[in-house]
Amino acid sequence: MELEAMIDMDEERDIVVFQDDDGNELTMEVLDYLAYEGKEYALLTELVEDEEDDGDEDEPVEVFIMEVRPVGEDQEEFVPVDEKLAETLIKIFESNDFDDEDIDGIYDEDEEEE
């Protein structure tokens, strides 16, 4: 299944709307970004619109990891990663042993190469 993503930069949240081949939409929220081995990745979860109706707080939340690739000047593409890489990235996200500034460095390097 191929998914397309559109970014809607909310005031405080990064919202991504994916559309499958059948036209079904899935709205996800980006929880965090991570730079790893020269690439940018995003940790996403399904968007919960009504904060009062978000279920049991102790219930585990399903998360997804996708590679973020720049497309053009103002667009990004979210690409699923393989299971082994996802496991590695989840461990890094859980450890909080990463620096958000590394993400800016990825784009700075791309601009210098052009």
Image (cartoon, rainbow, N blue to C red):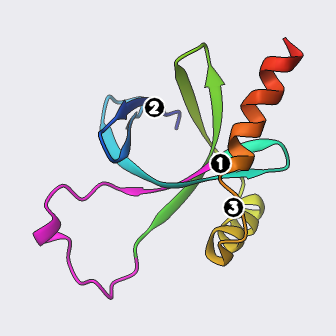
Give the amino acid at mark 1: Tyr
Q: Which residues are magenta?
A: 41-60
| Viewer-side residue, 22 vs 103 | 103
Q: Position of residue 49 (x, y in %)?
A: 18, 55
Question: Residue 18 magenta-drawn?
Answer: no
Q: Residue at x 85, y 49 (%)?
A: 37
Indicate which disc residue 86 carries: 3
Give the amino acid at mark 3: Ala
Q: Residue at x 76, y 42 (%)?
A: 39
**Secondary structure beneath label 3:** helix
Mark 1 or 3, nearer chain start: 1
Mark 2 — residue? 5
CB within 8 Å, label 3 to label 2 = no
**Secondary structure beneath label 2:** strand
Left or right side of 98 for 80? left
Mark 1 — residue? 41
> Could you tell me how far apart the alpha carbons at marks 1 and 3 are, in whole angstroms?
10 Å
Residue count near mark 1 (Cα–Cα under 10 Å), binned few <14, some 14–19, many ≥20: many
Give the amino acid at mark 2: Ala
Mark 3 or 2, nearer chain start: 2
Q: Position of residue 9 (x, y in %)?
A: 36, 34
> Could you tell me how far apart the alpha carbons at marks 2 and 1 are, in whole angstroms?
14 Å
